[in-house]
Amino acid sequence: MKRDWPLYEVFIRGKRGLNHVHVGSLHAPDDAFAVAHARDVYTRRNEGVSIWVVRADAITASSPDEKDPLFAPSGDKVYRHPTFYEIPADVPHM
């Protein structure tokens, strides 16, 4: 019987940022151990405020080969582009 631990992907939210960032991968026997192990491996200097661990086999992702057909439809949605109105002169930083 094979006793390999599953692979987890680790995401850390730093003190200075709002987004979780992928920092690496690790193997663990369960979710709780994965969080504890991620804390020990990826936040040694107290740089994180939140840890996410996700089993790698639970992630569904698009393929880079599908980039054009997957993202091309957004080009025909002209309402997403700010071309239908004028920006007032007193609106800064636009």
Image: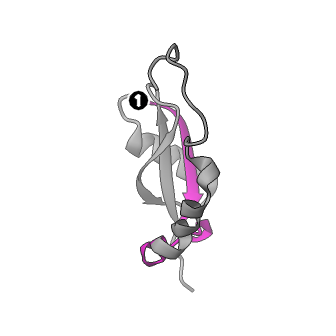
Foreground pick, 91 / 65: 91
Image coordinates of residue 10 in percent, x first then y, are 48, 51
Name the quadrant containing residue 30: bottom right
Q: Position of residue 84 (x, y in %)?
A: 60, 41
| 72 in relation to 83, above or below | below
Q: Quadrant of residue 41?
A: top left
Is the residue 40 above or below the residue 22 in the image? Answer: above
Between 51 and 92, the one lying in front of the other is: 92
- Residue most toward the top? 90
- The residue that appears at 43% across and 41% down in the rendered structure is 40
Image quarter (top left, top right, bottom left or bottom right) of the N terminus: bottom right
Residue 3 appears in the figure:
yes
Residue in view at x 62 percent, y 58 percent: 77
Residue 63 appears in the rendering:
no
Q: Look at the numbered disc 1 and give the secondary structure of its residue.
A: loop
Residue 3 on image: x %, y %? 54, 77
Image check: 48 left or right of 59? left
Q: Circle 1: is it few (<14), some (14-19), or many (20+) Cα within 10 Å? A: few
User: Residue under circle 1?
Assistant: 47
The image quarter containing residue 78 is bottom right
Q: Is residue 14 above or below residue 51?
A: above
Query: Looking at the picture, does residue 35 appear above or below residue 6?
Result: above
Q: Which residues are magenta?
A: 48-67
Specify whether residue 18 is painted magenta: no
Near-viewer residue (36 or 90): 90
Kindly identify the amino acid type of the residue bearing the numbered disc 1: Glu
